[in-house]
């Protein structure tokens, strides 16, 4: 309970407790003082525990104690409503560049497939949550040079806004850019729109989404192609222990020509409130890659993540 909400509930409840009604006047002085102290402390669990104890030791005053608890719960609900209204008003009045949160990631990778080497990896992801809208921006870069020669160069940037339809169902749009010369393309643009659904929301979380898509691929040999496709993706997160999270992200762009399937599996362990370390393994498979490129790339990463 935050400070302003706690003060509001405590003041209202103490005023109610102090009313000189005959019923409340029957409470012994020490019991009254104990309840007043619990309410003033502003801890809901403590207030309930103290009133439960008072009922046990003062069975003749249960009706009066129930009245005190009911008044406290009424004040608590009013404070909750006021706090939620204030939060909503703040969100509605915020500009586009406000209320963003995110995380930065920096570490090392080891790859196999079209390029077999070790290098540096960095990423940034930002999220802005509104009343019904959510905006997600993300970017990642994997880069390595050996004796002045680039041996790994992969970039990805994506923007995804979505809007709630129900508590679990939402509509999304996605714009994405990729570059990986070692996979044979200098640029790949993707656009998609469709529906997403939160299958699990309590404990482990699981979100799925799917919709039609369009992709344009520009190859390193100067040729290009555009295709209609279908996108399906899932995002699974599970706190398997304190400060340890298992993550599984997967996506599939299915189209005529070369379809792309990506799986990213990771374990993240918290170091402090803002820092964590992540181990991940990514598999990317293209069913019909450009001439000279292999179908499957893998990437193992170890990174430090900073939440802000």
Image: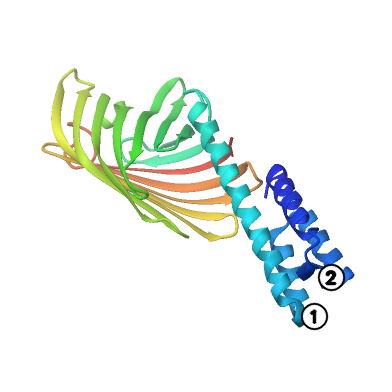
> Which residue in the structure is indicated by mark 2?
31
Residue most toward the front?
A: 22
Q: Residue at x 63, y 48 (%)?
A: 79
> Which residue in the structure is indicated by mark 1?
57
Q: Residue at x 77, y 60 (%)?
A: 17
Q: Residue at x 11, y 38 (%)?
A: 256
User: Residue 25: x percent and y percent?
Assistant: 82, 68
Left or right, 224 with respect to 182, comes to left
Q: Residues within 10 Å of mark 2 (few under 14, many from 20)?
A: some
User: Residue 156: x percent and y percent?
Assistant: 37, 29
Between 217 and 148, the one lying in front of the other is 217
Whether residue 73 is visible: yes
Say above or below: 305 vs 58. Answer: above
Residue most toward the right?
A: 29
User: Residue 129: x percent and y percent?
Assistant: 46, 36
Between 113 and 305, the one lying in front of the other is 305
Whether residue 101 is visible: no
If you read the primary sequence from the N terminus, does the residue marked by circle 2 or circle 1 appear first? 2
- Structural distance between the alpha carbons of marks 2 and 1: 9 Å
Left or right, 51 with respect to 238, comes to right
The local secondary structure at tag 2 comes to helix
Q: Residue at x 68, y 65 (%)?
A: 69
Q: Residues within 10 Å of mark 1 (few under 14, many from 20)?
A: few
Say above or below: 176 vs 254. Answer: above
Q: How many marks?
A: 2
User: Residue 124: x percent and y percent?
Assistant: 48, 31
Do tag 2 and tag 1 residues touch (Cβ < 8 Å)?
yes
Left or right, 150 with respect to 243, comes to left
The local secondary structure at tag 1 comes to helix
Mark number for residue 196? none
């Amino acid at each position: 309970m935050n400070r302003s909400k706690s003060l509001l509930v405590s003041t209202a409840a103490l005023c109610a407790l102090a009313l000189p009604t005959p019923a409340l006047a029957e409470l012994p002085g020490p019991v009254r003082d104990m309840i007043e102290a619990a309410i003033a402390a502003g801890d809901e669990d403590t207030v309930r525990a103290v009133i439960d104890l008072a009922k046990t030791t003062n069975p003749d005053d249960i009706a009066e104690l129930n009245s005190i608890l009911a008044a406290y719960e009424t004040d608590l609900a009013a404070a909750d409503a006021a706090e939620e209204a204030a939060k909503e008003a703040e969100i509605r009045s915020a500009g586009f560049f406000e209320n963003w949160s995110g995380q930065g990631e920096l570490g090392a990778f080891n790859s196999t497939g079209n390029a077999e080497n070790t290098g540096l990896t960095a990423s940034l992801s930002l999220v802005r949550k509104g009343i019904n809208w959510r905006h997600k921006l993300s970017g990642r870069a994997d880069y390595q040079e050996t004796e002045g020669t680039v041996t790994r160069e992969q970039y990805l940037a994506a923007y995804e806004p979505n809007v709630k339809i129900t508590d679990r169902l939402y509509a999304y749009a996605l714009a994405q850019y990729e570059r990986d010369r070692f996979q044979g393309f200098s640029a790949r643009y993707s656009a998609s729109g469709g529906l997403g659904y939160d299958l699990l929301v309590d404990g482990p979380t699981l979100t799925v989404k799917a919709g039609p898509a369009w992709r344009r691929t520009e190859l390193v040999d100067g040729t290009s192609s555009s295709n209609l496709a279908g996108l399906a993706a899932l995002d699974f997160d599970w706190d398997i222990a304190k400060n340890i999270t298992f993550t599984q992200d997967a996506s599939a762009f299915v189209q005529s020509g070369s379809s792309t399937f990506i799986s990213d599996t990771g374990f993240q362990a918290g170091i402090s409130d803002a820092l964590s370390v992540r181990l991940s393994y990514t598999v990317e498979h293209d069913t019909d890659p450009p001439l000279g490129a292999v179908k499957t790339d893998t990437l193992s990463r170890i990174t430090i993540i900073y939440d802000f």
